[in-house]
Amino acid sequence: MPVKIRLRRVGAKKQPSYRVVVADSRAPRDGRFVEIIGFYNPLTNPETVSVKTDRARLWLQRGAQPTEAVERLLRKTGALPPRPLATETPSSSEALTESGAK
């Protein structure tokens, strides 16, 4: 079963808040899930984020793939290490000219 860590929308119309859930990737956004591991409220200032980092790490070790939004939240809460800074690499056009391809 392919598993994802993603956001599940809850809250009233025009008042979104989200639960961070572990779910089968084939399940609908607000459908069945395996476990709730946190919540996210983008409407507060600053936004409220709470994630059970131990449970998130466990699911990541088991192969669960976070969505882009959840990955950002996990990095913010410390469940994932910060992204390494991009090292300077030559662009693909530079690499082609150096190898002699035209």
Image (cartoon, grey):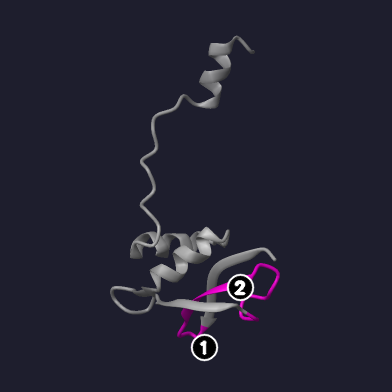
- The x, y position of residue 7, in whole percent, is 52, 73
Q: Is residue 79 left or right of residue 22?
A: left
Residue at position x 49%, y 88% in the image: 11
**Mark 1 secondary-structure assignment:** loop
Q: Which mark is residue 13?
A: 1
The residue at the point 54 percent across, 78 percent down is 35
Which quarter shows the N terminus? bottom right
* Residue at figure coordinates x 41%, y 65% from the top left: 73
Residue 75, compared with residue 54, is above or below; it is: above
Magenta part of the chain: 10-32
Image mark for residue 1: none
* Residue type, numbered disc 2: Ala
Crowdedness near tag 1: few (<14), some (14–19) or many (≥20) residues, C-alpha within 10 Å: few
Q: Position of residue 60 (x, y in %)?
A: 51, 61
Q: Is residue 94 left or right of residue 34?
A: left
> Residue 55: within the magenta?
no
Label number found at residue 23? 2
In the image, residue 88 above or below residue 40 = above
